[in-house]
Image (cartoon, helix red, strand yellow):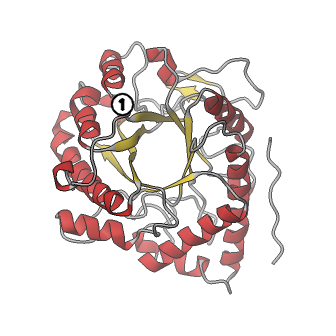
Amino acid sequence: MRTFLCTLFLVPLSLLVSCSRQETRVLFGHQDDVVYGSDWQRLADSAYADTRSCIYDVTGQWPDLIGFDLGGIELCHARNLDSVPFSRMLEECRRQFERGGKVTLSWHARNPLTGGNSWDTTPCLAQIIDPDTDVHDTMQVWIERAAAFIAQVAALQTQPEQLIVRLWHEHSGNWFWWGREAGSAQDYIALWHWTRNYMNILGINALYAYSPDKLTLYPDDAEGAYRETLEWYPGDEYVDIIGTDCYHFGGAEGINDYLARAHRQLDAAARLAAERHKKLAFTETGNEAIRCPNWYTQVLLPLCREYPLMYVHVWRNAWDIPQHFFIPDSQHTEAQDFIQFLHKL
């Protein structure tokens, strides 16, 4: 079937004997850091003479890592699901690479069966990977469009390994159409292979990250977490980074729950990464509105020191949703704690 591409603007460490603490610092990332913040936005299509950054506003330093999402690229939209123009995304990726930083791309694709958003969990995974269905043809077009844009980003790199592509994230939950209740592990792995193979066809130079979230399929112990992480793993030839997503909900009362989940998930990811000789990352985390005092130095920093992480990435500071932010601005009471965290990271 002929397809069309849209035109775009240009286990704890003590158990992991072979996995020692890295000598270099853990990189810190923030979603959409340079396109908007809690009280500002630069979402026009036109280029800006300079770049503003949530992290730079607080620390005077540029972010090590910036995250962007491709949701909307599959429909040839000019802007992603968070109103970021894809033309602007390309420009900011170029600037980030030229500063020597890294970029991570995720993709909240729409449900190709219903046309609903990523959170439309109408089961469709088995149909998507069946080559005799119309929805398979739709997904092929969507993968081609996403890959074409990713190829443009990859071409802007000025150093090796600056681009990280995080495919089909948080599949272990049940909130996305590619989640565990949408199909089998075999279906999910087939989608991963299909997507990655097309990236290879275009010769895209990137690292690829695998990032489950909550691990509840098997018993609530270390072996259960590891079994689930491994069961849905796409394979060594498809993955460069093994990570996990885990958020802290609430304030100080949520610390124990967060640390228990984070340790369980990071232990499983660290074990698999050590066994398969892959990089390890905390691919998404955060405490929305930083409701837990000293969260960065007292909660997140010890986790980052316990595991040999390549990077830790927190979510965005929405300019249009009050209290939806994950790093403090310069006037916030947690600003100094955040600065200390980055200094000690």
Task: Where is residue 68? Give x, y as percent.
Answer: 58, 42
Tell me the quadrant of the picture where the C terminus can be found. top left
Task: Where is residue 19? Give x, y as percent.
Answer: 28, 51
Q: Residue at horizontal 61%, vertical 83%?
A: 130
Task: Where is residue 250? Give x, y as percent.
Answer: 26, 38
- Say whether residue 297 is left or right of residue 66: left
Tell me if residue 205 comes above or below residue 131 in the rendering: above
Residue 211 visible somewhere in the drawing: yes
Q: Residue at horizontal 80%, vertical 60%?
A: 5
Q: Neighbour class for label 1 at 10 Å: few (<14), some, many (≥20)?
A: some
Residue 114 visible somewhere in the drawing: no
Q: Name the residue at the bottom extreme.
A: 132
- Say whether residue 186 is left or right of residue 266: right
Tell me the quadrant of the picture where the N terminus can be found. bottom right
Q: Which residue is mark 1?
A: 289
Query: Disc 1 residue type?
Result: Ala
Mark 1 element type: helix
Q: Quadrant of residue 292?
A: top left
Question: Is 345 or 292 nearer to us in this picture?
Answer: 345
Q: Residue at horizontal 71%, vertical 34%?
A: 88
Q: Residue at horizontal 26%, vertical 54%?
A: 18
Q: Quadrant of residue 173?
A: bottom left
